[in-house]
Amino acid sequence: MTDAAVVGRILREYHQRTIRPSDIRHLYGTVRGDRVSYQLLRPGAESVVVQAWRADTPVGPQFTGSAAATMVDWLCSRAATLAWLAERGYPAPRVVPTHSGDRVGVAGAWLTLATTFVPGSALEPDRDQLRMLGDALGRLHSMPAGADGDVFVAPDASVGPDVSVGLDVPVGLSAWHPVAAVPATLRRLDSVQALLPAQWRPLHDSFRRTAETVGQHAAGLPQAVVHGDAWPGNAIQASAGAGAGTGAGRAGGRPAEVILIDWETGGLGLPLLDLGYCLLECHMNPGQPQAWRIEPDDERIAAVADGYSRRRILAPAELDLLLAGIRFGVAFIGAIHFEQALLEGARGASMDIRLDRLRNRLAVSEAVAERATRHLARAGRRYAEPGRPEAAGA
């Protein structure tokens, strides 16, 4: 199979026969692997990003919380989440249907998901743009999901991919939804316990405590649609006047806004975990190596907290569990790394770098949580009642 053959099938699937070869850009992946992505530049229309996965590819361990059993399940749930956002006017990439109107396409052995391309520039993580990143996340978390009957969540992930059902638009589960992610994390930790080197045991113990804490309290925490990977590298400073497909650049001189992209991990979940991850990873700059160590930066934390609180105020239970919320992503990812290293034989410099990053995130998490709690509590007194969006910023 060649790039030309896969691209040809994609163009037929999306009825884009007028696109010239020079209008097709390879973004990442390879047809010799299990994933590849292209950008289609359409003259006179929005550009489209088409992501293609081999249909027989297993759902990755990083998407455990979505409870998807097959790649078809997982792609359909991703498309459903983006459609849910579109129904409510939230700025995000929009699903581009196939020529037959389906959200997920079939191009030979490949499954495809096409979305609009969000034009703009990479986020500069200064105070103003990090405040807009927090605002985008707070706006997302303030949209009703579950409490008003829009979304139903089954209490048991064993029911498979249809664990969330919308009355109008179904919503997939996020990659870290605790109904599936907590049991999966604990199973992975149990499976490697007898093989742990002594120097990894403190990490293992911390991962277990964090997963158990989130699992014990998840039922009492607010739910919403979450992004799952909110950091400056997954946010775009949208161009003023960008197309209505993203909701960016509205008329009347309103400034351009920050739009979250890369929704692979998005869906129904806990805002606490989404915000917690962002409070850690807001310290990273786009283009910075992902294993780079971070040091708590009070200005960055305050900017994200202030932007978030303009839209949504954490409930008291969320503030009390903020440290666990910040650490959960580290525990979830760390359990996967342990499984890969000790059961699948993934060793060497790459694994050493991953574990070093995890140690760094745990080491700084208490300081990040303490500073974030202070800023979020102060903003809560300034902006709104607990759990309610701030009307003035909507």
Image (cartoon, helix red, strand yellow):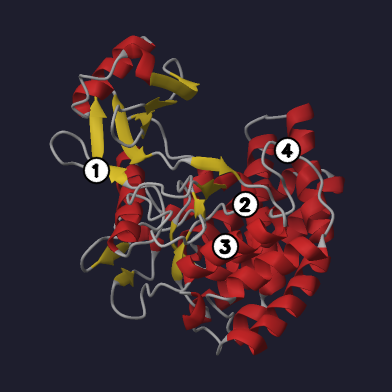
Q: Amino acid at mark 1?
A: Arg
Res 103 label: 1
Q: Which residue is mark 4?
A: 288
Mark-to-mark CA distance, 1 and 4: 33 Å
CA distance for labels 2 and 3: 10 Å
Q: Earlier in the sequence, mark 2 or mark 3?
A: 2
* Image quarter of the C terminus: bottom left
Q: Identify the amino acid type marked 2.
A: Trp
Element under disc 4: loop
Report which residue position mark 3 lands on.
274
Q: Which mark identifies residue 231? A: 2
Find numbered disc 1 in the image and state the secondary structure of the residue it sits on: loop
Amino acid at circle 3: Asp
> Is residue 276 rendered to the left or right of residue 80?
right
**Between discs 1 and 4, the one toward the N terminus:** 1
Q: Could you say where residue 257 lies in the image, as x and y percent from the top left?
A: 51, 56
